[in-house]
Image (spheres, rainbow, N blue to C red):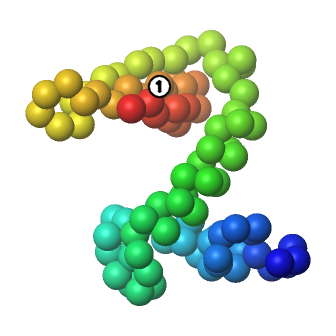
């Protein structure tokens, strides 16, 4: 196997396809996206997870001076999702499960 300029190593997809998946994932549920592109949702989730983790590595939270935390239950029981919000930019800074 040789590295290809149009594909991420080990992905099995082209970089163009991965970028389309990332954009569509912002606008539709994963199950509908998988159905739309005729691909397994677990493989699509691997793309999303890879780029999410890569983005989180570059994140710099040191300049946040006003923030908030919200916690909600994902399912009945004790599965919680914690959201960190930057009040100055009005954007979510991080979500932790």
The answer, for residue 90, to whether it is visible in the render is no
As drawn, which residue projects farthest toward the front? 1
Seen at 54% across and 26% down, the residue is 86
Q: Residues within 10 Å of mark 1 (few under 14, many from 20)?
A: some
Which image quarter: residue 3? bottom right
Seen at 62% across and 44% down, the residue is 53
Q: Is residue 87 above or below residue 16?
A: above
As drawn, which residue projects farthest toward the top? 65
Which image quarter: residue 21? bottom right
The percent position of residue 71, horizontal first and vertical second, equals 31, 23
Q: How many marks?
A: 1
Which image quarter: residue 36? bottom left
Residue receiving disc 1: 84
What is the secondary structure assignment of the residue under circle 1? strand
Quadrant occupied by the C terminus: top left
Judged left or right of residue 57, residue 71 is: left
Residue 8 vs residue 96, the one in the foreground? 8
Q: Is residue 67 above or below residue 42?
A: above
Seen at 83% across and 78% down, the residue is 1
The percent position of residue 17, horizontal first and vertical second, equals 63, 79
Judged left or right of residue 60, residue 30 is: left
Judged left or right of residue 71, residue 12 is: right
The percent position of residue 57, horizontal first and vertical second, equals 71, 36
Judged left or right of residue 75, residue 44 is: right
The percent position of residue 91, horizontal first and vertical second, equals 52, 36
The answer, for residue 44, to whether it is visible in the render is yes
Residue 93 vs residue 82, the one in the foreground? 82
Seen at 51% across and 17% down, the residue is 67
């Amino acid at each position: 196997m040789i590295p290809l300029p149009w594909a991420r190593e080990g992905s099995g997809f082209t970089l163009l396809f991965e970028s389309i998946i990332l954009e569509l994932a912002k606008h539709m549920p994963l199950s509908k996206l998988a159905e739309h592109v005729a691909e397994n949702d677990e493989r699509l989730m691997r793309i999303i997870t890879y780029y999410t983790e890569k983005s989180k590595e570059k994140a710099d939270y040191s300049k946040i001076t006003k923030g908030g935390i919200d916690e909600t239950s994902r399912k009945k029981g004790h599965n919680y999702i914690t959201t960190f919000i930057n009040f100055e930019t009005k954007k979510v800074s991080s979500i932790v499960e």
